[in-house]
Image: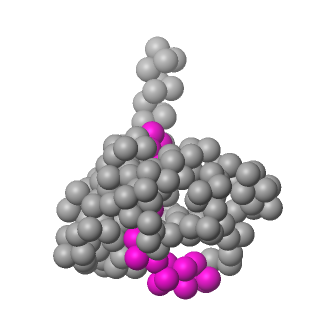
């Protein structure tokens, strides 16, 4: 089971995930994709977009209360983060890392400092690369276990409450300083 949780907004990479999953399933027909977080509109839209050959192997689940997400993560074998070209850190990444499950993620500047090839199956934001990462994760249980363990240990060290507060504080402070500096330079 490959799990995606979160919004179905375009920048999340849902098209990429579905196309890559279709490709990976051609090689491994045992794969199941579970996507949690669909709005009513998403359910209608994505139900139509899922190819007929995938419909039995994809489950679209409506938005769930935050406390229910841990149950879905527990069901999963792998956690998917298909968003690519974004600059922000998705909050689900913290849950994913702390879960101790293997993460399959596209390379992104937004979270590259948190998630690298020592803590996840990192791939390019392309159908071929993501499909290959899904298959590699499934074929390599020892590697998957090692990456999941490294990710969880990293999360425990780096995201304890005090460290998390400091991370958010410095991230916002850096952003505010950058904006202030940009305004100062454009004003001169």
The image quarter in which residue 148 lies:
bottom left
Question: What is the basis of the colouring in this image?
Answer: one colour
Residue 146 in the image: x percent, y percent? 20, 74
Q: Nearer the viewer, residue 88 or 167?
A: 88
Judged left or right of residue 168, residue 9 is right
Residue 113, visible in the rendered structure: yes
At x 51%, y 17%, the residue is 187
At x 48%, y 34%, the residue is 180
Tally of marks: 0
Judged left or right of residue 185, residue 124 is left
Magenta residue check for 77: yes
Above or below for 144 versus 116:
below
At x 58%, y 59%, the residue is 54
The image quarter in which residue 29 lies:
bottom left
Residue 44 in the image: x percent, y percent? 78, 56
Above or below for 67 versus 3:
below
Residue 101 in the image: x percent, y percent? 36, 76
Q: Which residues are magenta?
A: 67-89
Magenta residue check for 86: yes
Residue 14 in the image: x percent, y percent? 56, 51
Judged left or right of residue 24, residue 63 is right
Residue 81, visible in the rendered structure: no
At x 27%, y 61%, the residue is 136
Above or below for 40 versus 152:
above
Above or below for 98 versus 17:
below
Q: Nearer the viewer, residue 36 or 33?
A: 33
Q: Nearer the viewer, residue 114 or 78?
A: 78
């Amino acid at each position: 089971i490959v799990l995606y949780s979160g919004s179905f907004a375009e920048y999340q990479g849902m098209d990429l995930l579905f196309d890559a999953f279709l490709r990976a399933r051609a090689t491994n027909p045992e794969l199941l994709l579970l996507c949690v977080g669909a709005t009513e509109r998403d359910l209608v839209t994505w139900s139509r977009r899922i190819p007929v050959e995938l419909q039995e192997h994809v489950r679209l689940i409506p938005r769930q209360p935050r406390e229910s997400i841990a149950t879905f993560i527990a069901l999963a074998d792998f956690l998917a983060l298909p968003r690519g070209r974004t600059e922000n850190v998705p909050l689900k990444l913290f849950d994913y890392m702390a879960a101790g499950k293997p993460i399959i993620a596209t390379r992104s500047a937004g979270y590259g400092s948190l998630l690298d090839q020592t803590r996840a199956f990192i791939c390019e934001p392309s159908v071929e690369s993501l499909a290959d990462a899904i298959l590699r994760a499934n074929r390599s249980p020892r590697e998957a276990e090692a990456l999941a363990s490294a990710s969880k240990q990293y999360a425990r060290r780096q995201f304890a409450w005090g460290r998390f507060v400091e991370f958010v504080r410095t991230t916002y402070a850096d952003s505010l300083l950058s904006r202030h500096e940009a305004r100062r330079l454009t004003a001169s």
